[in-house]
Amino acid sequence: MPAWSNVWPSNLLDSPVFTISFKTAEDLIEFQKESRATVRVELESSIEDRTSHNVVATLPGESSETIIVSAHHDSVMTPGAVDDASGVSVMLEAAQELSDEELQRTVKFVSLGLKNTVWSGADIMWKGLKGQKCRES
């Protein structure tokens, strides 16, 4: 797996952050033990404007009280099957199972874009709820 990096705004961290695969880390540790070499990392990065979307589906209930079920459809460091396509698939299955039920409360199913960045789709979603009574559980 290639190294992955993410550049965060300078007010959050004192230095750039990057990760490498567990296997690469093991190889570097072994190399260090064998040769007492110094490991130097050079990181090239760029910032690009991209568009991302939150996807929202609503199952209306008898009351306007709303339950939000969310997962995210962006991924880092994995092909996406673990982070977080598995969560999205469970959310979609729950939506399908509940679609034939008469619900007391409205249920919103939200697939969030850009969950793994500073400019989070979750932040945008929750800011849209500002002023509404919310309870986390």
Image: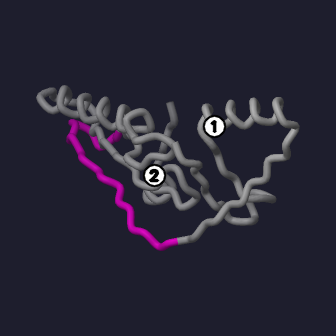
Q: Which of pointers 1 and 2 lies earlier in the amino acid sequence?
A: 1
Image x and y of residue 59, in percent: 21, 40
As displayed, is residue 105 above or below residue 108?
Answer: above
Nearest to the observer: residue 1 or residue 85: 1
Q: From mark 1 to mark 2, how far is it between C-alphas?
A: 47 Å
**Res. 131 visible in picture:** no
Which residue is painted at 48% across and 50% down in the image? 115
Range drawn in magenta: 48-66
As displayed, is residue 88 above or below residue 51?
Answer: above
- Element class at badge 2: loop
**In the rendered structure, which amino acid carries the disc numbered 2?**
Gln
Which residue is painted at 31% across and 29% down in the image? 90
Image x and y of residue 111, in percent: 35, 46
Nearest to the observer: residue 126 or residue 42: 42
Q: Tag 2: Cα neighbours inside 10 Å, few (<14), some, or many (≥20)?
A: few
Q: Which residue is mark 2?
A: 132
Nearest to the observer: residue 19 or residue 41: 41
Residue 57 located within the stretch drawn in magenta: yes
Answer with left or right where residue 72 lies relative to residue 97: right
Residue 67 occupies which quadrant of the picture? top left
On residue 24, the disc is 1
